[in-house]
Image (tube, coloured by chain):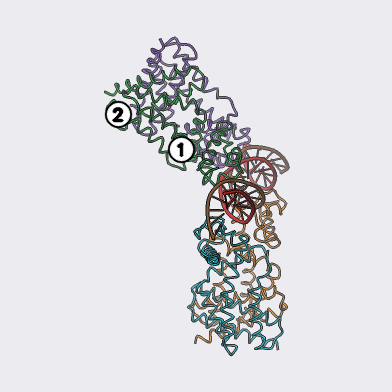
Chain colours: A cyan, B orange, C purple, D green, E red, F brown
Amino acid sequence: MTKEERREQLLDTAGQLLLKEGWDALTMEAIAQSAGASKTLGYAYFANLDDLIWSLYDRELGLLFGRVEAGLANADTFEDRIRAAVAAYFDTVAENGAMLVRLQAGIVARRLNRDRPQRTVNFLEALAAIIREEFGLSRRRAIAYAIVMAGIADSHGRAWAAETLGRAELEESCVRFMLAGVRDAVAAQT
Amino acid sequence: MTKEERREQLLDTAGQLLLKEGWDALTMEAIAQSAGASKTLGYAYFANLDDLIWSLYDRELGLLFGRVEAGLANADTFEDRIRAAVAAYFDTVAENGAMLVRLQAGIVARRLNRDRPQRTVNFLEALAAIIREEFGLSRRRAIAYAIVMAGIADSHGRAWAAETLGRAELEESCVRFMLAGVRDAVAAQT
Amino acid sequence: MTKEERREQLLDTAGQLLLKEGWDALTMEAIAQSAGASKTLGYAYFANLDDLIWSLYDRELGLLFGRVEAGLANADTFEDRIRAAVAAYFDTVAENGAMLVRLQAGIVARRLNRDRPQRTVNFLEALAAIIREEFGLSRRRAIAYAIVMAGIADSHGRAWAAETLGRAELEESCVRFMLAGVRDAVAAQT
Amino acid sequence: MTKEERREQLLDTAGQLLLKEGWDALTMEAIAQSAGASKTLGYAYFANLDDLIWSLYDRELGLLFGRVEAGLANADTFEDRIRAAVAAYFDTVAENGAMLVRLQAGIVARRLNRDRPQRTVNFLEALAAIIREEFGLSRRRAIAYAIVMAGIADSHGRAWAAETLGRAELEESCVRFMLAGVRDAVAAQT
DNA sequence: CATGAATGAGTATTCATTCAT
DNA sequence: CATGAATGAATACTCATTCAT
């Protein structure tokens, strides 16, 4: 197995483990052995456990944000952009939702050894830029709305996980909440 | 110190500790000593560390939901109810927000030893009932919207913590996102 | 409840606990609470846990040896004495066997904070005296045989607990092993 | 040090410790440090303290029963078998007696987490088979006598430890008690 | 005669991490 | 590229015991 393959395999295994056994089971030894290697193998690929976890986090969030940003980029009107982004979001959640939720929660719960992950910041900036362009707002206001819209996507993901409604309905609802909400909030300011 | 006072004191201390030092610092010993007691005193009041943490969680969420439900109840029109609930939410977040976020994240990240906390479920049911009454929806759909509206409150709290906008603006925005969103989502269904 | 009654009740409770839950459950707190009192009551009646356990041991062995010695005393021929003692032994084992075994084992396993219990020594001396009188042996030899005969009783008790044979047969066997054994062993010396 | 050597060394150390310091000193930490290792090394070789203790027990009883069974097997007449077994028993007791007694007592006193050790059962079955062959008894009766004869050996070991008589005399006495006893007990049944 | 609050010493156990091979 | 032996720090939890009331 090549260096890069091993690394990916270890991250994959860590993700599986987190999903199946929970955060507590995410030990260096468990990951390595779950990957079929000796218990200390991980240290040849990651400086320490935190490094491994942050790497997983970066990879997974990179995937998610990458797709969503791609969705945002490949459409013309504001509404279409939002629709495309929401669709991309639901796609990723469908594949990896439960693990992402756990990962995110664990990251928040852990000490803040590291600055707020750049990934999230970058994504919010990108979304804010689009909002700003559409409504002509200040940067801070646009960021606030971006945070809120990301939260709306998130909670629709949760509503989906709770099996309240089907994907199609929730995707439509998500877009509606975002668009009607932001329009009304913006209107209230003027 | 009486039994009840001690118990409350230990929970207070645990909350402070979580806020200041993070989840990892939340050890039985640290809590007890931070409360000025011997390191094993906690075991006289809680069966184990998990029990203490769940007790803290219950207490804090009880407070939050209690206030928000009170807000929901003490108003006449749908919009007024939402406004009152949002105001109550912001009040609590102002006092305790960072700690609640950490607590919630830690609870999610920990093993699922316990069923989903009844508190949250109850609150969502209450909110769903109000939504249902207003729009005449099915129970599942109302619950989905309740989850989303709770998420909107949550993300406005985060936007506040990120110091993007002031409280007044965010409270207004929160109400707008909720009302315009739910109305539009409901409209889309018909 | 009078002082003496309480004391006896605590010893009774300790015995029950040892029987039902095993040696590890024999804590001062468990005993007191099992007796329906507050957890520290025991300290008003016994200097410490060791003292309580030794008191139980003394009481129980006193009962056993008392009965067996009474049996030894109330008969004329050597064989009748042995028979009477064995019958008394089986009587006590029938009532209290399992607890006595545990108690004895625990005492042996614990540190030897205390000299060999006088009770056992006294009993062995009494039995040795009778053997000596019957066969005209040296004191040391008589003690050796006394130890062995006590061991024979003990192992018959175990055979009974293992439900191999009924009491009548084992009692007879016990007497036979003792008498034939000691006679043959004595004969071999001459 | 190789895996197997370390394991044996830890068991050796545990045995020494039990003999010298008593059951209470038998902690994982004490064993490891007494073996010149860091305090948690034991966990790399045994699942937990119980596992280590049972392993010691198995090893020691395996040695004892192995020798005694070998003695039983390598002789022709019943008496010679018994003699050989008793000699083997005294040999082991000479080396390891005090420790075995403590170990056995501790095992009995501890909780019954584990089924009765197979080792003892197997040995008693082997002895019972020989008795049965000699006297033509039922299986249950033969087992009862096997238990008693094992008890006779045991009590002779105790008489030896009490320094009442010398080994030669006690070995002879042991054989006599067993043979005369079992013959007389069997005779009583017919 | 009895209680409840509190302490502190002790023990099992886990796990990240290092190092020699 | 990988292993296994070993370490040490950290933590949960138990329990005998004391003391004030």
Query: At 65% across and 77% down in the image, what residue appears?
Result: A122
Q: Nearer the viewer, residue E13 or C29?
A: E13
Q: Residues within 10 Å of mark 2 (few under 14, many from 20)?
A: some
Residue A131 drawn above or below residue C176 = below
Q: Is residue F15 above or below residue B63?
A: above
B176 on left or right of C74: right
Q: Percent x, y for residue A131?
A: 65, 85
User: What's the amino acid at mark 1?
Assistant: Asp
Picture coordinates of residue D64 (x, y %)? 44, 31
Q: Nearer the viewer, residue D16 or C143?
A: D16
Looking at the picture, which amino acid does disc 2 mark? Arg
Is residue A111 visible to us here? Answer: yes
Q: Which residue is mark 2?
A: D132
Quarter of the picture holding the N terminus of chain D: top right
Q: Which residue is mark 1?
A: D58
Q: Position of residue C158 (x, y in %)?
A: 41, 31
Which of the labelled discs sits on residue C81, or is there none? none
Instruction: Say if mark 2 contacts mark 1, CB within 8 Å.
Output: no
Alpha carbon distance from label 2 to label 1: 27 Å
**Pointer 2 and pointer 1 on the same chain:** yes
Q: Is residue C74 above or below residue A46?
A: above
